[in-house]
Image (cartoon, rainbow, N blue to C red):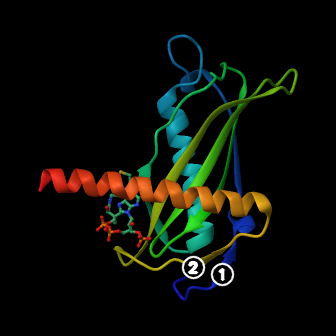
Amino acid sequence: MNDRAAVPASVTRVELTQLVLPQYTNAIGTIFGGQVAAWIDMCAAISAQRFCRTQVVTVSIDELHFLHPIQRGHIAIFRSCVNAAWNRSVEVGVRVEGEDPLTGERTHTASAYTTFVSLVEGHPAPVPRLLSESTDELRRQGEAELRRQSRLRHRDALEARRG
Ligand SMILES: CC(C)(COP(=O)(O)OP(=O)(O)OC[C@H]1O[C@@H](n2cnc3c(N)ncnc32)[C@H](O)[C@@H]1OP(=O)(O)O)[C@@H](O)C(=O)NCCC(=O)NCCS
């Protein structure tokens, strides 16, 4: 889709739920960080594709801080949506929570901000406009603009340094 039609943020919501089996844990029995990053990327990619309806690639994942572990046998929940859309790229936010299956108690594990580029025939292509409707969606869009400025400044500074 590249006609700049408007797509509501709500249609990009994705929830991915995983049982933390032993193969997803580290040596101390809590979730492996690399696995969390992979599921973040997968959940976010589905949001980006629901928005763009093209192939998409991850161009950037912002700093990822792990606030609380998730134990083996607990549930990992990933929720994502498109926060903002620019010319050929979108920011997708992902919130990760751990759930104790016996009590239902949920803990915030991490939040991540990912950027995806829409590709058509292998080249960056225009994305639709984002329709942010709720107060939360508008807040996320505004905050995403600030993160984009900082991301692109960082990228440009590195490129200038490398010459
Ligand atoms: C994504 C990719 C196609 C972009 O190509 P490029 O020539 O660097 O891109 P451009 O400079 O033309 O920019 C394309 C878009 O990406 C955005 N972008 C590029 N680098 C970025 C970064 N570090 N952070 C955020 N956005 C970035 C640009 O702002 C632009 O979006 P906009 O038009 O909405 O402003 C290319 O970098 C690539 O193929 N990277 C590898 C992607 C990949 O393989 N990911 C899978 C995991 S390894």
Q: How far across and down, in percent of the image, does residue 58 sit?
A: 43, 56
Taking the image as shown, residue 45 lies to the left or right of residue 16, namely: left
**The N terminus sits in image quarter:** bottom right
Foreground pick, 133 / 12: 133
Quarter of the rendered image showing ligand 1:
bottom left
Mark 2 C-beta to ligand 1 under 8 Å: no
Q: Mark 1 = which residue?
A: 6
Q: Mark 2 = which residue?
A: 128
Badge 1 marks a residue whose secondary structure is strand
Query: Image quadrant of residue 156?
Result: bottom left
User: Residue at 56% of width from left, 85% of height from top?
Assistant: 4
* Amino acid type assigned to the residue bearing label 2 in the image: Pro
Q: Are marks 2 and 1 in contact (CB under 8 Å)?
A: yes
User: Residue at 72% of width from left, 61% of height from top?
Assistant: 137
Label ID, residue 91: none
* Amino acid type assigned to the residue bearing label 1 in the image: Ala
User: Residue at 24% of width from left, 50% of height from top?
Assistant: 158
